[in-house]
Amino acid sequence: MKRSRRCKIVATLGPASNDEAMIEKLWRAGADLFRINMSHTDPAGMRERVAMIRAVEEKVGRPIGVLVDLQGPKLRVGAFSEGGADLVKGQNFILDSDEAHGDSTRVRLPHPEILESLQPGHKMLIDDGRLRLDVIEAAPGRAVTTVEVGGRISNRKGVSLPDTEIPDAAMTEKDRIDLAAAVETGVDWIALSFVQRAEDVKAVKAIVGDRAMVLAKIEKPQAITRLDEIMLAADGLMVARGDLGVEVPPEKVPGLQKRITREARRLGRPVIVATQMLESMITSPTPTRAEVSDVATAVFEGADAIMLSAESASGQYPIEAVEMMNRIAMTVEIEPVYRSIINAQRSAPEKTGADAVASAARDMAETLETEAIVAWTASGATALRVARERPRAPILALTPNRDTARRLTLVWGTEAAVTRDAHDVDDMANRACKFAVRQHFANPGDRIVIIAGVPFGTPGATNMLRIAFIAEDGLRAQ
């Protein structure tokens, strides 16, 4: 079942999609990989979902990716004696370390590291930004604020700190337990929440090693100021527009989305655009026109993947939401203007032999109008380099590593198949032709471009380019 679109779809699993039959339906509707949100599950629940995904993968005979999204530090106020309080604009309100229940004058903030980091002039956003406080006095264990935007504050509402850098790493103790379980279970991508600096990503990669790829979620202003170094440290990016839209002015989010998407492509890092893409489909069988335009914009920009959250996790129409996203992406990609936008964003290749070969493969495929680019890859690096060029021809990645095939389900325009590594140049060309026909990328008599590295099986050694005609038997090059 070869996909006819280039942009990938990530579907989040949850109560509405928590069995093997539904996961298979979502995959057949267009989902390429599945997200497990650790904010709403534990290691045992994660393992159950991974087992179901792997069972579907075995049934459909295609690699399916698994993305585990770590919760990250969730900052919340404490409890109130009456369940909540009404804050009035202009009043003072205190957040402190006192364990007593709160009232209209104060509440506990059970995060001593935050109370130590707050400074006068910092803003505090409560309940997704519905309440806004300005810090006017700060001392260890206590912060006095003025209410800028008032309203009802209730037990354990979330706190966002757009101006405050949290000194601790992005991982909590829960994250460490979840991360260890995810790596042991064999997931493909780990998403790290509330990244502030490259060191946050590096700390996770030091634990993960080469057992999974690490994706940095960009959702804090501190990450925006250090975007270049975070991108270099991470294997992929997610534009997490929910929290990002709380901590930065919402009108800035579209521009940041475009900036992150384009820079990620330049660096060859897969990028996911996420949050509220088809939000109305949580309760409605059809999206709003604005939501359709939002999804289409991400596809036009060349994002590697677009993501459904509550729409597929807890919504009433999970299959319809995936089908809608699939139709939007397919329709955008056949628009005449799509290719001109994609080409206009193409940047010069890096000054390496591997990038030069990948760029040449794209140019050759465009000039000859070949049916496919077949990339032999052990680690996935060759396929990533070709995908960075956003060629018109689809990319078929042949790899001896099942883990690599699963990780590539996130990469734009790339379909992967698992096979033993080539043992010589003729074997490389013959099996590239055979798989191109078998996977419905090309037919006998068509031409394909083959890109590989010699010696075979050496990661990062992309140095070979070949044009092959597929013989009439479809099993060899001629």
Image: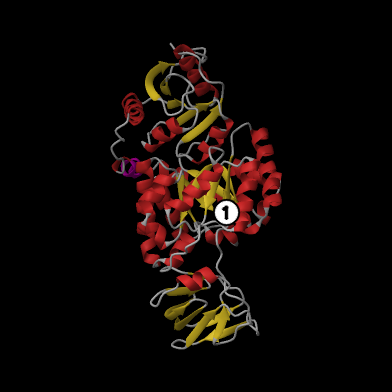
Amino acid type, residue under disc 1 in the picture? Leu
Please report the residue visible at 66 percent of the width from the left and 44 percent of the height from the top. Answer: 50
Quadrant that contains the N terminus: top right
> Mark 1 Cα within 10 Å, few/some/many (few <14, many 20+)?
many
Quadrant that contains the C terminus: top left
- Report if residue 473 lies within the magenta region: no
Instruction: Return the residue at label 1.
Output: 70
Residue 236, image x and y in percent? 46, 45
Counting labels gives 1
Residue 45 located left or right of residue 263: right
Dot 1: what SS?
A: loop
Seen in the picture, residue 116 relative to 93 is either above or below; the reply is above
Q: In which quarter of the image is residue 248?
A: bottom left
Please report the residue visible at 60 percent of the width from the left and 33 percent of the height from the top. Answer: 62
**Residue 204 visible in the snapshot:** yes
Which portion, as a residue range, is magenta?
A: 336-342
Front-lying residue, 70 or 444: 70
Front-lying residue, 243 or 346: 243
Residue 419, image x and y in percent? 56, 23
